[in-house]
Image (tube, grey):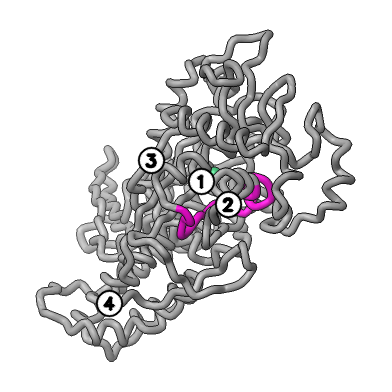
Amino acid sequence: MPRTIYLYNTASRNKEQFEPVHDPVGMYCCGPTVYNFAHIGNLRTYIFEDVLKRVLLSAGYKVKHVINITDVGHLTSDADTGEDKMEKGAQREGKTVWDIAEFFTSRFSQNLKDLNIIQPDIWPKATDHISQMIDLVKELEKKGYTYRTSDGIYFDTSRFDSYCKFARLNPESLRAGERVEMGEKRSATDFALWKFSPTDKKRQMEWQSPWGVGFPGWHIECSAMAQKYLSLPIDIHCGGSDHIRVHHTNEIAQSEAATGKQFVRYWLHGEFLVLDKGKMAKSDGNFITLDSIKEAQIPQLAYRLFCFTAHYRTPLTFSWEGLQASAHSLQNLRSMVPDVDNCRQIDNGVIEKLLHPFYMAVYDDLNMPRAVAALWDLLRDRAIDPVVKRACVSCADEILGLDLLLEQRKFSEELIGSDGVKIKLISESRLSDTDKINIVEKIRIRKAARESRDFTTADRIRDELGGLGITIKDLPDGTTECTIPASVPG
Ligand SMILES: [Zn+2]
């Protein structure tokens, strides 16, 4: 019997007890549009979805997880105008659309690996499912939900009575907005199912259809791929909160209009990662990638822990200081795990009981801040047998995915200068050359100051390094031993 999980369902705006209809549980997550690197705000959504999947698995469910790859048809404007992001990306990079799709798909897959996100069971690409999309549009056409304009086939939202329900849209205010970007659309909320290729320039990606040469709309892609791999109603559909108003509202309208069945039972949405200046967005060029974190010599998994500092349904403000703090926390968590051989058979009941507060938190709509706090309490509890404690951490880490049992690897290097100065550097992570030069330079100055009995300078340098978490020890043979934490600021 799987354990009881409560999830906040966007459809009802309530926390509900999760009761799937399928085994394995069907889970569809809107995937990346592969025209650029994913920014860490996008990745926050995939981390939340990964935690959800791990929680379902730990509660005893099997899961069939689909993340699609959007490699065509996502336009720069939600109003079905603007350029195709993929074609625009190809122009920017001077490559073919197919090449950039392949490149950014593989970068995205690497990002998932670096964040310990379990790869989905199925990764469908939009361009491999054009015939399913055409079939779905044909079905909608047959049932009278479509109309044609000079640039495409559109979904007539006025025919779908509950269109405004999911996003709690106000039909009056929608009508007021109809003056903008209407084109030939009958209503502002109508959206393209199939777009015709422009007549003035040749697109790299286009297909024949019963309506003319063109390409699918972004929303129909998700409906077609979700229905191909998962049975309706899909148990869980996830995405970023920015998808509620347009993308998911449209997915529901076209899927339910075509099939006459409920599309999804539980809708879960992750909130944004924000910068002090506002939302992180690729359109402003204002974005940080996982590679930027690696370049800053911060372990990428520190970002996963950073995401656990806020509930997935609340916005999280990113700062490098906050990320550094999470890097230290990660290091501390790992160092507090008892280093003992886990050979003894431990009673599951004992682990369950000790992890009760942890499980209560994760099964309560994935409350990760509370779950991490429960783990700290467990690690600090001296009354727990070290072998049992290690086994508990191992179970908790199946959900956390933080490699908490990873041995702290230390990098050690001995340097002897031409002037005979001996320095030993011990660091938790590989140091960049710049960091190394800066640290060595400071130690040299300190050593020279000590030799000329300038203790004020010597102490000041020791304090400066201490402020960065770096400790210095003067060994009897004259070597200065310097211990540097995993994430030393440059
Ligand atoms: Zn989608």
Callout 3 secondary element = loop
| C-alpha separation, residue under disc 4 versus residue under disc 3 | 33 Å
Q: Quick check: marks 1 and 2 in contact, CB under 8 Å?
A: yes
| C-alpha separation, residue under disc 2 versus residue under disc 4 | 32 Å
Q: Earlier in the sequence, mark 4 or mark 3?
A: 3
User: CB at mark 2 closer than 8 A to ligand 1?
Assistant: no
Callout 4 secondary element = helix
The type of residue carrying mark 4 is: Cys
- The quarter holding residue 27 reads bottom left
* Residue at image mark 1: 30
* Residue at image mark 3: 123
Q: Earlier in the sequence, mark 4 or mark 1?
A: 1
| C-alpha separation, residue under disc 4 versus residue under disc 1 | 33 Å
The type of residue carrying mark 2 is: Gly
Callout 1 secondary element = loop
For residue 41, above or below residue 468: above
Mark 1 packing: few (<14 Cα in 10 Å), some, or many (20+)? many
> Is 346 left, or right, of 330 in this rendering?
left
> Is 282 left, or right, of 455 in this rendering?
right
* Residue at image mark 4: 392
**Looking at the picture, how far across and down is residue 109, in whole percent?**
38, 40
User: CB at mark 1 closer than 8 A to ligand 1?
Assistant: yes
What's the magenta region?
232-249
Mark 4 packing: few (<14 Cα in 10 Å), some, or many (20+)? many
Q: Earlier in the sequence, mark 2 or mark 3?
A: 3
Residue 240 tag number? 2
